[in-house]
Amino acid sequence: ETGVTQTPRHLVMGMTNKKSLKCEQHLGHNAMYWYKQSAKKPLELMFVYSLEERVENNSVPSRFSPECPNSSHLFLHLHTLQPEDSALYLCASSHRTGNTIYFGEGSWLTVV
Amino acid sequence: AQSVTQPDIHITVSEGASLELRCNYSYGATPYLFWYVQSPGQGLQLLLKYFSGDTLVQGIKGFEAEFKRSQSSFNLRKPSVHWSDAAEYFCAVGFKAAGNKLTFGGGTRVLVKP
């Protein structure tokens, strides 16, 4: 059981589609993250939001667009993705001044 | 640049046997250290963490890890493995100046034989 909930758990989309991944945390945290996990590659930090302000954009292509409307919700908007973007996308949260990050179950994305 | 190395990509262990997973890091400052576990198709679950103090830390599911500053290591151990421990294990390192940004190792996949 996790305090970080991600939907959908599985998503298949075409390269011309627009879709969004949603993350909600119930831990009272004020920082949220998107990570990408691809086969045979270490986890990659994509975006960091602290107090709803983006503080990190780790050279992520513009076809990925994050949104953090409040401290409990985080979205990743997807458009014109490539097959190599197929991966597990993990959302995480923490206290802004804390040191421990808690992850959600992930959203499996397949781009066809 | 900071890096985290998990030298073993796969480890196979018999049920009931002991397990040790290696993690080495390269950092200039005193790190924060974490071990996470990922079961198939799932997200990452925190097993344990080290910030300061006693260098032997206890975690959930019977795991422990020992921080050895002289070796820049944070190895994970379990005295007796259960079939449910089959999963992928990730070591992660952060440090105070980087806020909450973690650098992850490549992971070690553990297979448990009956």
Image (cartoon, coloured by chain):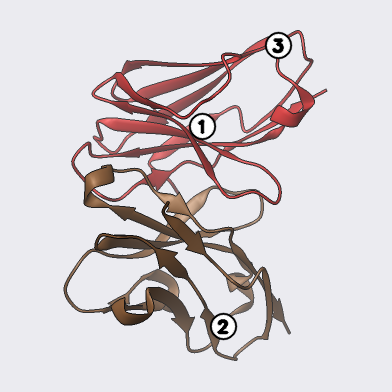
Chain colours: A red, B brown
Q: Subunit of mark 1?
A: A
Q: Subunit of mark 2?
A: B
Q: Answer with left or right where residue A106 lies relative to residue A87.
A: left
- Choose the circle earlier in sequence order: 3 or 1: 1
Coordinates of residue A94 in the picture (x, y in percent)? 29, 40
Whole-angstrom CA distance, mark 2 to mark 3, is 45 Å
The residue nearer to you, when weighing A66 against A44, is A44
- Determine whether the residue tagged by mark 3 lies in a helix, strand or loop: loop
**Residue topped by disc 2:** B81
**Residue topped by disc 3:** A80
**Residue topped by disc 1:** A6
- Determine whether the residue tagged by mark 1 lies in a helix, strand or loop: strand
Q: Answer with left or right where residue B88 lies relative to residue B96.
A: right
Q: Would you call the spot at circle 2 few (<14 residues within 10 Å), some (14-19), or many (20 or more)?
A: many
Q: Subunit of mark 3?
A: A
Q: Are marks 2 and 3 in contact (CB under 8 Å)?
A: no
Q: Image height check: is A59 above or below B104?
A: above
Q: Mark 3: which amino acid?
A: Thr
